[in-house]
Amino acid sequence: MPNVVSMFNKQNQDQQELISHIEELLQAAKNGDITSVLVAANNSDGNITTGYCNLDYGQKQTLISHAQLDVALQFVSANME
């Protein structure tokens, strides 16, 4: 089982920070550190963009599951007493 590495988790609405994160991912892909990707993004018009590259069905489900677990962990961490 691979380790899950969170590259960023920012909640502010700064567009430049969003661009910096995407550029960071692009550089990691150029370096060969990222070999596949699954994306979901909110668009300014209210639509949602999704996409993937170099993933079969099982790999897509694995990445989706890791994202869901990350959200659950953030929820639990924010609500611990």
Image (tube, rainbow, N blue to C red):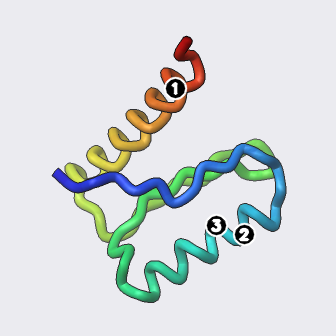
Q: Residue at x 73, y 52 (%)?
A: 43
Q: Are marks 3 and 2 in contact (CB under 8 Å)?
A: yes
Q: Earlier in the sequence, mark 3 or mark 1?
A: 3
Instruction: Give the label, 3 or 1, closer to the camera.
Output: 1
Label 3 vs label 2: CA separation?
A: 5 Å
Q: The disc labelled 1 sits on which kind of residue?
A: Ser
Q: Regarding mark 3 in the picture, which secondary structure is present there?
A: helix
Which of these two is toward me, 57 or 5? 5
Q: Which mark is residue 21?
A: 3
Which residue does the numbered mark 2 point to in the structure image? 19
Q: Regarding mark 2 in the picture, which secondary structure is present there?
A: helix
Q: Earlier in the sequence, mark 2 or mark 1?
A: 2
Q: Are marks 3 and 1 in contact (CB under 8 Å)?
A: no
Which residue does the numbered mark 1 point to in the structure image? 77
Label 2 vs label 1: CA separation?
A: 27 Å
Q: Residue furthest top?
A: 81
Which of these two is toward me, 20 or 64? 20
Q: Residue furthest bottom?
A: 31
Q: Quadrant of the C terminus?
A: top right
- In the rendered image, residue 28, in percent from the top left (x then y), is placed at 47, 79
> Does 54 appear above or below 6?
below
Q: Residues within 10 Å of mark 3 (few under 14, many from 20)?
A: some
Q: Residues within 10 Å of mark 1 (few under 14, many from 20)?
A: few
Q: Quadrant of residue 24?
A: bottom right
Q: The disc labelled 3 sits on which kind of residue?
A: His
Residue 32 shown left or right of residue 2 in the figure: right
Q: Regarding mark 1 in the picture, which secondary structure is present there?
A: helix
Q: Residues within 10 Å of mark 2 (few under 14, many from 20)?
A: few
Residue 6 shown left or right of residue 15 in the figure: left
- In the rendered image, residue 58, in percent from the top left (x then y), is placed at 20, 50
Q: Residue at x 33, y 39 (%)?
A: 65
